[in-house]
Image (cartoon, rainbow, N blue to C red):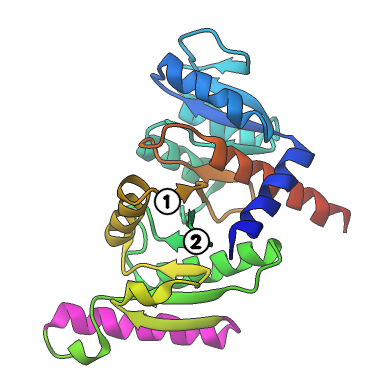
Amino acid sequence: MDSLFIESLKQKARARRARIGIGIWNADCNLIASLESAAEYADLLLVGDPGCACNQDCFVSQEPWNDLVRLLAAGEIEGAVRGNLPAGRTMGALSGQFGIRVRRLALLELPGWAFMLGPVGIDEGESMADRLELLLGGAGLLRNFGVKASSAVLSGGRMEDRGRCERVDRSLLEGELIASRAREAGLAAEHKGILIESCRGDDIIIAPDGISGNLIFRTLLLLCGAQSYGAPVLMDGIFIDSSRARGGFDGPVMLAGCLASIREEQAKD
């Protein structure tokens, strides 16, 4: 996927202007001010306590992680963005309200290349089954965007590293199996071992586990200047996770608005 793909998402979000809730927790006035640009893509409802004057609609809450999820479940907002809410409380509320195991992939953009990366939650992707579900779910999500995904599965070594230690052997075997089962499901998937540098151009990258995925994400975002558009949770509703390390939430709001546009188009069909 390239920059034209990202621009097409932005156009869909601008045209639809969905009602999107965003969580706010102990925010400063700079963060609240940054939401003005995010309002280009959606009609925002701030859920929490802004703590200073703002031009957006607000739902004042002392437990915004619960109320954000509740508003989404009740259909009072079309999509939700975590904003700067605590991850553990918010994902717990989401899991409890919708009865799901939280799985998410981050949409990232480097010059000339956009892709999805998962797992990015440190407690996600522990099992081979979890990572396979992420890959299959990510491919399904990209199909909604009109993309037939090519996928790369990473593991803990080069192919010739088999035999160096049990952990590497297990990681290599799991990478092979995940890619094989994804191909059996009709996806273009390749196990690339530890060679992340060979993944450029792929649409989905699956890390060996959530800790390594989170490290890759943080390295790209905070050290290499990658653009992040948030991490959609694989579920029936629209919930975009967003790192508290970011300075603004234009990307996640845009992605939530775009998904709302696609859902509306699919409902009409």
User: Which residue extends farthest left?
Assistant: 164
Badge 2 density bin: few <14, some 14–19, many ≥20, Cα 10 Å: many
Q: Amino acid at mark 1?
A: Ala
Under tag 2, what secondary structure? strand
Q: Secondary structure at mark 1?
A: loop
In the image, residue 170 sits, relative to residue 218, either above or below, namely below
Q: Which residue matches tag 1?
A: 226
Outermost residue toward the front?
Answer: 111
Decide: is 102 above or below 60: below
Sequence-first disc among 1 and 2: 2
Instruction: Name the image quarter holding residue 19.
Output: top right
Does residue 236 appear left or right of residue 159 in this picture? Answer: right
State left or right for residue 12 relative to residue 72: right
Residue 182 in view? no
Image-based side of 10 in relation to 106, left or right: right
Majority SS type along the magenta span: helix
